[in-house]
């Protein structure tokens, strides 16, 4: 669904209203049932989506490190602290609002991002055709939004400082490598062939040997087989390093110009409502995530 469509805008408005009217757990369960066609058991979660729902509602919003690493600016410090400074996309600027941006100081090509949500990106491929006024208007609108309200991803709502960053443009033919990491261990990854608009991406899941996993996401077009890049082993090691502090996180990289760059840490992929076909992978992958101690500790707090 295009973000400029009336249907998309109406849905977003309805989501914000629901977020302020209904208990967050109730609303999240409702979205889950609509999209995945079963009711999540959050008392004894078993599937991957159920367990990520639990983390989304009860763990990550209270985890200061997770909140900091959700922020697209603050996470850069975390990545650097892990010895992976060279994997960061060069930063061109950071601003509190669009009025602070000095457009003439930016290069011919660049990428703008708001730091407090997903898909808040504007790509400038040529200043000759770029409209700074339209970009500033869009950025200002995004800065006012509470991204948590759209799919009850509460950790986004804990980001206090909404900012804009500009990063170096890495090219037109970027490939996403996204590693699903459980307790610091990458178990599998997916490759996406489109970074400009996530919902138009082609996607394929693979194990760490590069063998295709026979499943598809129902909301994405499937991608074929791949050849692992020369830097793949380095990506796996970087994913291990960046995921070690969390029970689950998806570690995302860009592959560009023969090397890889850090993209982001994603704690609740698809807002913890991934549509998998066959659905048996939801149960199988759920076994990678040990939740007993987290749930027990959470219960002791109340």
Image (tube, helix red, strand yellow):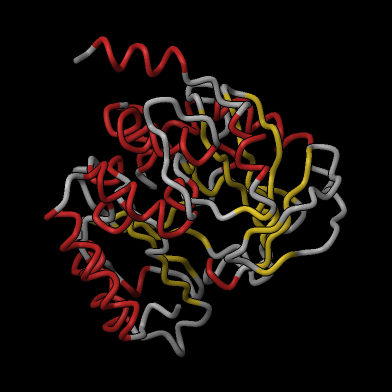
Quarter occupied by residue 165: bottom left
Closer to the camera in the image, 236 or 189:
189
222 vs 143, left or right, is right
Q: Please give the name of the residue rendered at 30% of the width and 40% of the height, measured from the top-left corner.
A: 155
User: In which quadrant is the C terminus drawn?
Assistant: top left
Which residue sits furthest left? Answer: 21
Say if 5 sits above or below 50 in the image. below
Quarter of the image where one finds residue 250: top right
Q: From the viewer's perspective, is 188 left or right of 226?
A: left
* Relative image position of residue 240 (x, y in whole percent): 63, 27
Instruction: Tell me residue 156's x, y (percent).
Output: 30, 46
Residue 275, above or below 238: below
Where residue 32 appears, x then y in whole percent?
41, 51
How many numbered marks appear? 0
**Residue pictured at 78% horizontal, 40% vertical:** 207
Residue 266 vs residue 161, the one in the foreground = 266
Horizontal relation, residue 285 to residue 43: left or right: right
């Amino acid at each position: 669904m295009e973000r400029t469509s009336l249907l998309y805008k109406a849905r977003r408005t309805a989501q914000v209203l629901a977020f302020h009217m209904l208990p967050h757990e109730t609303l999240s369960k409702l979205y889950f049932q609509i999209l995945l066609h079963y009711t999540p058991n959050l008392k004894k979660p078993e599937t991957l989506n159920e367990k990520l729902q639990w983390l989304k509602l009860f763990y990550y919003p209270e985890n200061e490190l997770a909140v900091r690493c959700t922020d697209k600016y603050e996470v850069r410090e975390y990545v650097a602290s892990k010895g992976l400074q060279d994997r960061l996309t060069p930063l061109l600027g950071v601003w509190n609002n669009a009025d602070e941006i000095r457009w003439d100081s930016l290069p011919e090509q660049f990428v703008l991002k708001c730091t407090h949500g997903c898909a808040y990106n504007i790509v400038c491929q040529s200043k000759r055709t770029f409209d700074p006024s339209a970009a500033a208007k869009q950025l200002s609108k995004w800065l006012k939004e509470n991204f948590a309200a759209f799919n009850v991803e509460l950790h986004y709502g804990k980001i206090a400082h909404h900012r804009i960053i500009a990063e170096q443009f890495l090219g037109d033919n970027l490939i996403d490598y996204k590693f699903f990491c459980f307790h610091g261990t990458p178990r599998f990854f997916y490759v996406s062939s489109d970074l400009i608009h996530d919902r138009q991406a082609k996607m394929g899941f693979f194990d760490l040997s590069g063998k295709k996993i026979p499943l598809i996401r129902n909301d994405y077009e499937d991608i074929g087989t791949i050849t692992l890049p020369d830097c793949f082993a380095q990506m796996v090691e970087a994913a291990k390093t960046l995921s070690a502090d969390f029970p689950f996180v998806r570690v995302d990289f860009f592959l560009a110009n023969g090397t890889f760059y850090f993209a982001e840490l994603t704690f609740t992929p698809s807002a913890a409502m991934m549509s998998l076909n066959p659905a048996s992978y939801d149960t199988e992958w759920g076994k990678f995530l040990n939740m007993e101690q987290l749930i027990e500790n959470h219960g002791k707090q109340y």
